[in-house]
Amino acid sequence: MGSNSSRIGDLPKNQYLKKLSGTESISENDPFWNQLLSFSFPAPTSSTELKLLEEATISVCRSLVENNPRTGNLGALIKVFLSRTKELKLSAECQNHIFIWQTHNALFIICCLLKVFICQMSEEELQLHFTYEEKSPGNYSSDSEDLLEELLCCLMQLITDIPLLDITYEISVEAISTMVVFLSCQLFHKEVLRQSISHKYLMRGPCLPYTSKLVKTLLYNFIRQEKPPPPGAHVFPQQSDGGGLLYGLASGVATGLWTVFTLGGVGSKVAASPELSSPLANQSLLLLLVLANLTDASDAPNPYRQAIMSFKNTQDSSPFPPLIPHAFQINFNSLYTALCEQQTSDQATLLLYTLLHQNSNIRTYMLARTDMENLVLPILEILYHVEERNSHHVYMALIILLILTEDDGFNRSIHEVILKNITWYSERVLTEISLGSLLILVVIRTIQYNMTRTRDKYLHTNCLAALANMSAQFRSLHQYAAQRIISLFSLLSKKHNKVLEQATQSLRGSLSSNDVPLPDYAQDLNVIEEVIRMMLEIINSCLTNSLHHNPNLVYALLYKRDLFEQFRTHPSFQDIMQNIDLVITFFSSRLLQAGAELSVERVLEIIKQGVVALPKDRLKKFPELKFKYVEEEQPEEFFIPYVWSLVYNSAVGLYWNPQDIQLFTMDSD
């Protein structure tokens, strides 16, 4: 690169890169390094430039792979970087812009080289390049200094210890990116990696003591959402001789080398933003998710997951339980605010799920908040726009609701929060509605979307489980929410009748022809009847536990009473229909006594009066509906590909050739 490099197109023929990857050994003290690291070039603006940069890096890497066993230049570059990082904190305090700029450039080159090395070779081969000692072909020593581990520790120190200033912003982002690259070998394997050299370094040895500090720093980076320094904030004049250290930053580091790359797409619906307000926060969150989802070592659990599971609020003065490793404290209020504000991205939703599911301190804190609408509304909006979201994002949002609805206090409080003018809900103008009723509307809409489009049983089950958890605590249901509950039952009833008719016709056809294979209508019927029973249980739970709080649901039941007639004698529903049939019969009788031509207001008044008169002991008690989210066996088979797809789509300054990816399937577009 060097001071004469100004365009990506120049990189393949750049004299400094040729020398780095060539056959000549370069000493750590050679002035060459100052020349190599004094570069700047404008960020690429097209896919052609992105591809050109990737190709330029690959060509240099191929030469370096071939020659490094004889030259040791990769090790020399890393040692130059390591020696500079020892003075980085002091340089930041002294505002030594040039020193930080060059150190950043060294790390940028290391990251680019490392990314291609990892793609091109096994971890064992990579380790040989990092443990090189003697400058003779093929001579590697097991006792030599392990630069790979030293570099990882150095990156962890840089991320956690260097103060975040305008002049250190880019190198902080680059350090996090390089750690992501270290772990990116997973991208090039179809199976989940359960043993990895990089995992081993991170989970034991000199890197391990940094665990809690690293997790805390990454969380605070996410919380603070620090924006990059403004373009042109640090510009240096070029020296008159044109070739010294003071090469003008121009459109290089000052504009943020983190903008050098954008990413292609794994899945066309992953929400990737080309202009992130905080690249540091985005990159920190991605690295945190990667670390949290590393598989456990054979002899020790994942320490980063342990740290995420155990951290406490800064306001909590109680001692940490004994034998809790990697514990720390963080400001829960700030974390809660950031989580509420950032739910438009997959990765923020995945972090929220991870914290709610794995950290009981966070879960208890969130459920005690009096402003839960700030968290729940963004989750509902994700589900409402299900057509625009990828299925993983929808699942995470739904599971978050399921976890929240496991708490009775949450289920009560959401009906006490009154919302006005929900602009994103377009089916109907909602000028005033409780958070609880809105939640019901959105979950039912998700079920109906799934019935007509994706037909995913897992999604159905979780939606119904969330409704079931809430059903005993339904309070003052909005009339539209009550209508939609009964409308969903109507839709299921029609589907049941249709499949039943198809099954009957199919059975008749089978009597006349034994050669034609028949669809498995019995299985379809069984699934639909399971869902219908669940809906009946939800309605029954509300009537049994909070009838007096829900006149609108009784009204909707009476209005569509004919729907339930066919299920009264059905053997699968007879028991659960008793209470519903009793309520319909009781209130129908009172309405009949009141005469014809009744207004809506009069009907509701009769219902409210009737609730008081209805003997509660006549309603049969059923076991309480309670469903708890249980993570499936081997969750890493789901989460690791998901996390890496987010990295592939959303990471700043990192690009991988789609043809090289093995972990997940690439979309054609």
Image (spheres, rainbow, N blue to C red):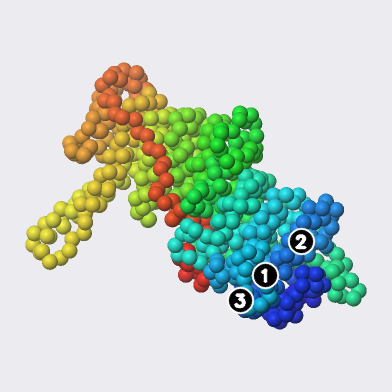
| 21 over 599 or under it: above or below | below
Left of 176 or right of it: where is 641?
Answer: left
Q: Position of residue 400 (x, y in %)?
A: 48, 43
Q: Is residue 578 left or right of residue 465?
A: left
Dot 3 and dot 2 residues touching (CB under 8 Å): no
Instruction: Name the side, left or right, on which 599 lies relative to 73.
Output: left
What residue did someone put label 3 on? 138
Is residue 58 shown to the viewer in this render? no
The foreground one among 589 and 485 is: 485
Residue at 55 percent of width and 56 percent of height? 199
Residue, disc 2? 83
Distance (Cα) linking label 3 and label 1: 10 Å
Near-viewer residue (548 or 311): 311
- Identify the residue position indicated by label 1 in the image: 133
| Image height of 564 relative to 495, above or below | above
Graded by Cα atoms within 10 Å as few (under 14), some (14 to 19) or many (20 or more), the crowding at tag 1 reads many
The residue drawn where x is 28% and y is 19% is 617
Q: Nearer the viewer, residue 301 or 439?
A: 301
